[in-house]
Amino acid sequence: MNCDYCKSKPATVHLTKVINGQKTELHLCEDCAKQSGEINWFNTFSLNDIFQPFSVNDLLSSFLEGVNGNNGNMGYNTNVSAKCDTCGMTYDRFKQTGMLGCRHCYEAFGDELTPLIRRIHGNVKHIGKVPRKAGSELRVRREIERLKEQLDRAVKEEAFEKAAELRDKIREMEGKLN
Amino acid sequence: MDNWISANGPDSDIIISSRVRLARNLDNVPFPTMMDDKQAERVVGDVGKAILDSRSALAGHFKLVRIKDVQQLDRQMLVEEYLSSPDLIKNDKSGALLINDDNTVSIMINEEDHVRIQCLAAGLQLREAWELADKVDDLMEESLSYAYDEQLGYLTTCPTNVGTGMRASLMMHLPALAMTNNIREVLHAVGRVGITVRGIYGEGSEVKGDIYQISNQISLGQSEDDIVNNIIAVARQIIDKERRARQMLMDNAGLQLEDRVYRSLGIFTNARMLNTEEALELISNLRLGVSLGILKDMDLKVLNQLLFMIQPAHVQKHKGRELQPTERDIIRAELIHEKIRR
């Protein structure tokens, strides 16, 4: 008997499978049996097919297609010649590489980037770490917001002494900002 | 924090390593895409000083390595040990690395971003890795000004990293889920909660040796703690499923499993030629054997070491020269015998 798959080599592996009462028989040569994976005890299979090599650029360009497509754009593309004045990066080049040239590109390409960033992250507002230095002002402002909430609570609870303390603290911090 | 090779971390039988990467750029220099050589040199100098000249106790534990001073084979070894990205070692001009003594921190300079802080820990220690990265980041910020925007957070060369600049990932060994055909379903579910799955060498790499890397997909709109907690929560579920699959295999196909492990041991210790892929597959079976108590005299640490020792550059370094692929397979088998016998 020859192999059911290649029909040339003799069948040395004989398999009987019963799936939902359906019986099938397979007679394979050793090579085809190995390749078919039919004799793998644990029924392993290669997963590489679901892990298609994936690159950020592919991802980005698929996001970009959606953003810069003609829908809603009234048929013309306004971004063709957009360029960052600080570093010289063009929007076209960014579209190809997915990489920006400097921090000012974020402003220069803001109109196009904002929807893109929203598509990628589902969000355009950072709520994570604030660097101590660059964010010192921001830290103060967030601290003021926090103190104001406490002040509201203190007033509601009629804890006026505490409220006065908080008010002074807020004034002091606001002074720092100006 | 233990180095990942030690296998001393929590859940080390399944989680090989935890890694956190933070992308940062300097405020007053164009990103690596647009900077000139002089600016690139300044970045290396400033970032190097930020660590090495700091008064922190950390400073004494770091060394600065210029890529141009590293030989090709040694460069590849840095990648194989996860201390450098494949892209960084191509930057002959201005690429550099700050690495600490125990290889738990590596700071890549002039990669896609000016700075990429990476912390690598054994087992499920993602929170610990983030805390260390946070500390290193604070230290660097004492003397550097980062490109930061109140709205968008840390500004990165690629908008996919903007915000926290964070990628938190776990390297997971999931042989039982693969054997029992459950992996596809598990990974599919993971994908729906904003987590990406990749192979052992990151982006675009194939799955080998049943090793999967999971990491956060988005970096903006979630705090660093949220990202870490999210991944840990998902990992806990995967760990639980893998453990159950392992138990199920032991209960229902114990003999076949033992057979598979001992056959792998036989090939591993007796083969005269082994390519990387086969070696990884065998290591996977042996890891499983150790975790299930089938192999009692083998150490997860040795298997972790072998994970990179069998890689091409390490094999060639062992012989002290470049080797043809066939030669490599021979040396790889020799190297494994030596390592296992010890």
Image: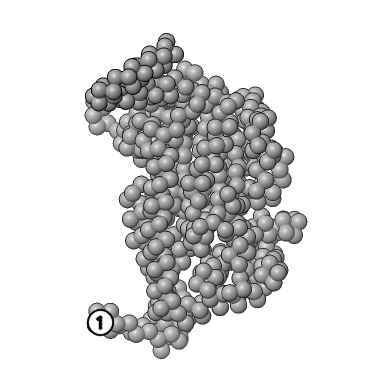
Q: Is residue B180 above or below residue B305?
A: below
For this orientation, the residue located farthest to the right is B320
Between B245 and B58, the residue placed more toward the observer is: B58
Q: Is residue B188 left or right of residue B27?
A: left
Residue B165's spot in the image, x, y percent?
46, 36
Q: Is residue B206 above or below residue A106?
A: below
Between B22 and A121, the residue placed more toward the observer is: B22
> Chain under label 1?
A
Q: Quadrant of residue B342?
A: bottom right
Q: Secondary structure at mark 1?
A: strand
The residue at 38%/32% (across/down) is A127
Q: Is residue A171 above or below residue A69?
A: above
> Is residue A141 in view?
yes
For this orientation, the residue located farthest to the bottom is A1
The residue at 37%/29% (across/down) is A113
Task: Give amino acid for label 1.
Answer: Gln
The residue at 60%/67% (across/down) is B299
Q: How is the image coloured?
A: one colour
Residue B136's spot in the image, x, y percent?
57, 36
Identify the image quadrant of the N terminus of chain A: bottom left
Residue B230's spot in the image, x, y percent?
38, 47
Q: Tell me if mark 1 has few (under 14), some (14-19) or many (20+) residues whose alpha carbon lies within 10 angstroms of its own.
A: few
> Is residue A68 in view?
no
Residue A13's spot in the image, x, y percent?
43, 85
Q: Quadrant of residue A23?
A: bottom left
Q: Is residue B198 left or right of residue B137?
A: left
Between A161 and A109, the residue placed more toward the observer is: A161
The residue at 56%/48% (across/down) is B120
Mark 1 lies on residue = A22
Identify the image quadrant of the C terminus of chain A: top left
